[in-house]
């Protein structure tokens, strides 16, 4: 069986080259075949959501437990990984300008907080994925490199080009040289790479999701901005939809719970967790579910969702001091993408107030100084709650009061009635 080439590009913009060059790239990472989703599997998805019709967030958490089940807790990280993999809807305005639908995620944390495990699991969930490390990646390795073969110049694709339409995982993001990090700015926002090497001038597509992991520079100082703690520039940080900070604060209660969870997994004869394992979605089902959501659902924002997102963005712009690099127009686009991704995760084609507030909570978790929630807490110690729907009702009431748009929603409901 012949495998299709990883990349097939026609260079229309060549200068003074009288012949056509075909770029054929070899890749080490295996390109996974298309996922086949049967009607029986789609019916199971629908039955699952009918079962949790009265408690939708409980059903959502049941799906999130299937992400890295070997890692205890870390609810915020698992939610962020799910929303990043699902992504939003690409938008093209009247002038032809394209706004990307793919989200980007950066995990900043102390050693031993499970960053690399999340990267590898996300690569398994994606239909096409490339994993690389910052220490072994140069600008040419991430984008393209020009090589001479038989007297002719050819372009060999890098990690971002090979991951077009999929996921690019970059571990040890801080180990990359500053010059190499600057080359991915265009790939993350415009989703293209402009090449001008060895007389070859073209533009390659990099419609990919970037999932990065990095360690803080020395001891993480909460009083310093994120750019100082990570040595990453503001323009690069603003391109990430979610930046989660995982700090090992040595909480004795949390350490006791985690140690008991790890020890119980190490003993195969113990059956205390059989009930929990039965409720976890297997990897194959979760992979098909993510693929089905991206193919079938195109969520549209409702008036309530637009009002919540707009109010939060204006509040962040007024209160932005230390996070000026994060509170740009890109944050507004990130809120829309995350709300659309959550609507997809909830098996809906409509972005409701629930999705908008969940997107706000994700953005709040990635802010070093919160504008709404007084105490977000450490994302490393976030856990699944027993009654997520009740917990959400409290958070919704708090956020709407802080945004000052609770009365507006009452007026909207009266007008609709």
Image (cartoon, rainbow, N blue to C red):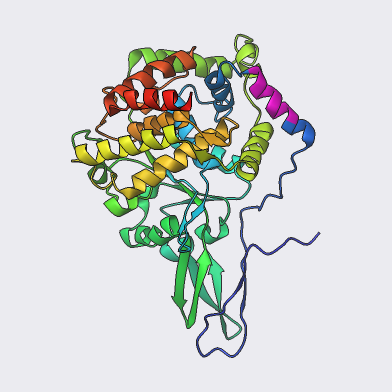
The residue that appears at 65% across and 12% down in the rendered structure is: 269
Residue closest to the eye, 306 or 82? 306
Residue closest to the eye, 181 or 101? 101
Q: Is residue 390 visible?
A: yes
Q: Position of residue 284 (x, y in %)?
A: 68, 34
The residue that appears at 47% across and 53% down in the rendered structure is: 100
Find residue 37 and report its image quarter: top right
Q: Position of residue 20 (x, y in %)?
A: 62, 83
The residue that appears at 32% across and 27% down in the rendered structure is: 405
Q: Is residue 50 magenta?
A: yes
Q: Position of residue 378 (x, y in %)?
A: 33, 25
Q: Position of residue 26 (x, y in %)?
A: 62, 64
Residue closest to the eye, 220 or 312? 312
Q: From what the image shows, is residue 100 above or below residue 43?
A: below
Q: Quadrant of the N terminus?
A: bottom right
Q: Is residue 294 magenta?
A: no
Residue closest to the eye, 262 or 105? 105
What secondary structure do most residues of the magenta stretch adopt? helix
Q: Which residues are magenta?
A: 43-51
Q: From what the image shows, is residue 347 above or below residue 181?
A: above
């Amino acid at each position: 069986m012949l495998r299709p080439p990883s990349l097939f590009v026609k260079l229309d913009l060549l200068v003074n080259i009288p012949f056509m060059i075909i770029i054929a790239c070899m890749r080490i990472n295996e390109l996974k075949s298309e996922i086949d989703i049967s009607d029986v599997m789609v019916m199971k998805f629908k039955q699952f959501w009918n079962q949790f019709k009265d408690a939708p967030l409980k059903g959502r958490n049941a799906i999130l437990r299937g992400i890295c089940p070997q890692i205890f807790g870390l609810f915020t990280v698992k939610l962020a990984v799910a929303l990043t993999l699902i992504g939003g809807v690409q938008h093209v305005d009247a002038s032809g300008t394209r706004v990307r639908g793919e989200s980007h995620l950066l995990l900043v944390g102390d050693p031993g907080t499970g960053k690399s495990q999340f990267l590898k699991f996300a690569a398994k969930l994606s239909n096409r994925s490339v994993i690389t490390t910052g220490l072994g990646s140069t600008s040419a390795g991430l984008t393209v490199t020009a090589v001479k073969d038989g007297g002719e110049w050819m372009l060999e694709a890098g990690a971002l080009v090979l991951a077009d339409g999929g996921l690019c995982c970059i571990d040890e993001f801080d180990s990359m040289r500053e010059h190499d990090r600057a080359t991915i700015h265009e790939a993350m926002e415009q989703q293209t790479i402009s090449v001008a090497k060895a007389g070859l001038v073209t533009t390659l597509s990099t419609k990919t999701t970037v999932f990065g992991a990095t360690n803080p520079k020395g001891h993480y100082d909460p009083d310093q901005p994120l750019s100082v703690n990570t040595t990453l520039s503001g323009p690069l940080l603003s391109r990430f939809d979610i930046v989660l900070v995982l700090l090992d604060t040595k909480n004795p209660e949390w350490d006791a719970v985690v140690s008991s969870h790890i020890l119980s997994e190490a003993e195969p004869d113990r059956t205390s967790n059989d009930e929990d394992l039965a409720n976890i979605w297997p990897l194959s089902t979760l992979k098909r579910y993510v693929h089905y959501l991206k193919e079938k659902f195109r969520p549209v924002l409702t008036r309530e969702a637009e009002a919540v997102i707009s109010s939060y963005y204006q509040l962040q712009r007024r209160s932005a001091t230390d996070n000026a690099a994060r509170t740009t127009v890109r944050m507004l686009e990130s809120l829309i993408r995350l709300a659309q991704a959550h609507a997809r995760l909830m098996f809906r084609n409509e972005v409701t107030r629930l999705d908008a507030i969940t997107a706000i909570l994700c953005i709040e978790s990635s802010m070093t100084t919160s504008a709404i929630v007084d105490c977000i807490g450490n994302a490393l110690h976030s856990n699944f709650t027993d009654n997520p729907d009740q917990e959400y009702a409290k958070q919704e009431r708090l956020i709407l009061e802080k945004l000052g748009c609770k009365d507006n929603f009452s007026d909207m409901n009266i007008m609709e009635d």
